[in-house]
Amino acid sequence: MKQHLQKIDFLRGIAILMVFVFHSESALYPDFLVLTYKQNGIINAPGVKSLILNLSPPAFGWTGVTLFFIISGFLIHLGYLRNQDSFSIRTFYSKRFWRIFPAYWLALFFFCFCTGGFWLYFFYRTGFENFVLHVFALHNLLPATFYTINPSYWSIAVEVQLYLIYPVLLYVRKRIGIGKTFILILLLSLTTLMLEIIFDNKNVFGYRYSVIEFWFEWAAGAYMAEAYFNDKRILKNAGLLISLLLLLLLIPGKYFVYTNYFLIYIATLSWVIFIDWLLGNKKIKMESRFSKLIINIGLCSYSIYLIHQPFLFDMVNFFNIISNKHLTRILNIVPAFAVIFLISWSLYQYVELPSVAFGNKLRKRKENQ
């Protein structure tokens, strides 16, 4: 059990580092995310630099969010499988609330005050509505509020919404099994995506960055949990090699417009195979200094995610004052991450852990009444 938890925290550490590097690249080179395609469907890169930035490994750091969603589905459903006889929707949502919202609300208030939007968010109707949508994790539903306050918080909203529809997954699973449930959710995602493409990618169906888009990732984690719980492997051989080859496919996939739409599915399959390989390989021990460092980063990955934007650009530029050399500018993301990690560790120790403990205490008190 200890090895399992360490490996999951290791994966969380990898995920948050990927997200951080991805956002660091956008901070260093703000134009690299402005991606268009020519009429022939080939990537429209204005120069070699732009092409390298868009096809380099850091540009695929967004798959760290995919990894987070898979891990979430895996852990939530594994907990359900281990406690089916005592599963309670009330207890489930209570645990999720105390795990997610106290730290999230604290960070949300902080950024409202520190990004110059205090008057906007509390004394103007539009801004206050934006703030309320963030409080209830609904801001990803509207384009106007999607990237406001803190651009990273869209995935927090999606995560909360995935929790809300978890009983639906359980209901369908009970009727047709986890395998067919995953296929059904995957088909829903693919169908909605195809409709978006047919309608010229105008987001008519609200697919992009919605819970519909990411539900299949979460369901993939749930599917993995059942395989792990029943001591089954998704792939018995060459799991690491296949997962790495799939990740490499993301590079040519991004080069063409229509294959770019399906990168999220390739990334999900790659991570599922990698997690299956890591958890199933008993020879891998999380005992090296490197592993322990990544595990510690993984422990406070949620807090890192909460605070690493929107000040990352300012932090990178602050450290760039030391030197304007190109290599030094890139390396300056290291001290920037160190500062963010120290703050995040404090948030993890003094907000995340106490709020979870407080929630557990409240539940035990109610159970004893």
Image (cartoon, rainbow, N blue to C red):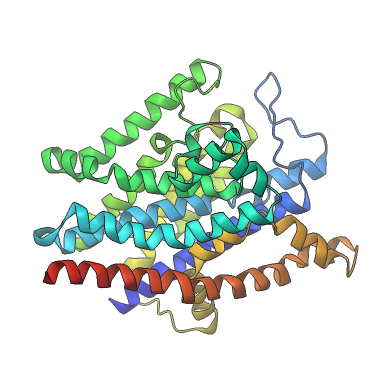
Which residue of the protein is positioned furthest toward the front in this rendering?
123
Which of the 4 quarters of the picture holds residue 77?
bottom left
Instruction: Write the residue at 71% across / 68% down.
Output: 336
Instruction: Write the residue at 32% across / 48% down.
Output: 163
Q: Is residue 329 left or right of residue 158?
A: right
Vertical side of 143 occupied by 63: above or below: below
Instruction: Write the residue at 72% across / 65% down.
Output: 333
Vertical side of 104 occupied by 195: above or below: above
Residue 196 appears in view: yes
Q: Is residue 277 left or right of residue 142?
A: left
Where the N terminus falls, by quadrant?
A: bottom left
Where the C terminus falls, by quadrant?
A: bottom left
Tally of numbered discs: 0
Q: Nearer the viewer, residue 256 or 215?
A: 215
Residue 145, position in %: x, y?
57, 36
Which residue of the protein is positioned furthest toward the right in this rendering?
324
Q: In this view, does 354 lie to the left or right of 251?
A: left
Q: In this view, does 307 lie to the left or right of 87?
A: right
Residue 335, position in %: x, y?
72, 72
Instruction: Write the residue at 81% across / 60% down.
Output: 317
Residue 81, position in %: x, y?
18, 59
Residue 141, position in %: x, y?
47, 33
Q: Nearer the viewer, residue 63 or 254?
A: 63
Which residue of the protein is positioned furthest toward the top in this rendering?
199
Which of the 4 quarters of the picture holds residue 191?
top left
Residue 227 appears in view: no
